[in-house]
């Protein structure tokens, strides 16, 4: 008697979503690290939040979370702009007109599938611009090595922490959907949307590693 073959699962249909694809040159190591460590995870989390909340029928919650995320990003952008303006003035006051080139810039292809992703992309570009001004002042001996090292990693981690907070919002929405009895719907919708069944986790070790690395760099700066 022939064995019954296992049922073949139907191929998952991909959802067609509107996306802008934009390419930018990113120079500084700090902005490159934010892209490498946080960007892909952030995109998935923002999309997952939208998928989950629409399943549980919380249109108002979607609007509220979008507003919260937009404000978080806007507040960070304002801080970056203020610091960039301060350093630009310092550069002008010292008569500096040069801009350094970078040894290993990268081509950043941004897939913008929501207004919040567009905001975060602009945040990365703003970080890169700030780092260029800071590196200029450091190379021209206007700011010392210790200050430059500490400031570089402060701003890099500022963006990474922001991305981590958004990932945490996704996890909270995911848990709430399961608590409301929408677990199977959410799991299937995540699969259909090309997402993992469960949100990516942010371990305590990851946060501690970032803090430790920053402290290590600061200690090295003090010893130079």
Image (spheres, rainbow, N blue to C red):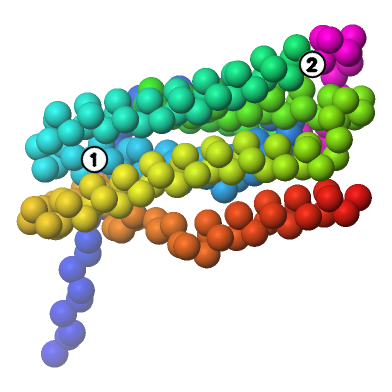
**Nearer to me, 182 or 19:** 182
User: Which label number is shown at residue 90?
Assistant: 2
Chief secondary structure of the magenta span? loop
Q: Start and end of the magenta stretch? A: 91-105
Q: Residue at x 47, y 62 (%)?
A: 204
Asked if residue 43 is positioned above or below residue 11 in the image, the reply reads above
Q: Position of residue 182 (x, y in %)?
A: 11, 53
Q: Position of residue 76 (x, y in %)?
A: 50, 28
Q: Residue at x 70, y 37 (%)?
A: 151
**Residue 105 lies in what quarter of the image?**
top right
Asked if residue 126 is positioned above or below residue 153 in the image, the reply reads above
Q: Residue at x 72, y 42 (%)?
A: 150
Q: Secondary structure at mark 1?
A: helix
Q: What residue is pinned by disc 1? A: 51
Q: Secondary structure at mark 2?
A: helix
Q: Is residue 44 in sight in this rendering? A: no
Mark 1 neighbour density, 10 Å: few (under 14) some (14–19) many (20 or more): some
Mark 2 neighbour density, 10 Å: few (under 14) some (14–19) many (20 or more): some
Q: Is residue 169 in sight in this rendering? A: yes
The mark nearer the N terminus, 1 or 2, is 1
Q: Position of residue 43 (x, y in %)?
A: 42, 39
Asked if residue 134 is positioned above or below residue 189 in the image, the reply reads above
- Is 10 within the magenta? no
């Amino acid at each position: 008697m022939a064995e019954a073959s296992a049922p073949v699962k139907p191929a998952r249909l991909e959802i067609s979503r509107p996306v802008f694809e934009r390419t930018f040159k990113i120079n500084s190591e700090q902005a490159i690290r934010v892209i490498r460590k946080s960007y892909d995870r952030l995109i998935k989390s923002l999309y997952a939040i939208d998928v989950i909340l629409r399943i549980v029928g919380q249109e108002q919650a979607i609007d509220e979370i979008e507003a919260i995320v937009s404000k978080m990003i806007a507040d960070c952008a304002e801080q970056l702009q203020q610091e960039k303006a301060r350093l630009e003035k310092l550069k002008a006051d010292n008569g500096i007109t040069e801009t350094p080139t970078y040894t290993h810039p990268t081509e950043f292809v941004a897939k913008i599938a929501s207004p919040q992703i567009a905001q975060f992309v602009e945040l990365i570009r703003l970080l890169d611009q700030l780092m260029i001004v800071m590196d200029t002042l450091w190379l021209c001996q206007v700011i010392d090595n210790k200050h430059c090292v500490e400031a570089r990693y402060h701003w890099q981690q500022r963006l990474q922490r922001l991305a981590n907070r958004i990932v945490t919002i996704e996890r909270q929405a995911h848990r709430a959907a399961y608590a409301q009895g929408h677990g199977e719907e959410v799991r299937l919708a995540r699969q259909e949307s090309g997402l993992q069944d469960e949100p990516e986790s942010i371990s305590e070790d990851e946060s501690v590693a970032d803090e430790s690395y920053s402290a290590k760099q600061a200690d090295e700066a003090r010893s130079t």
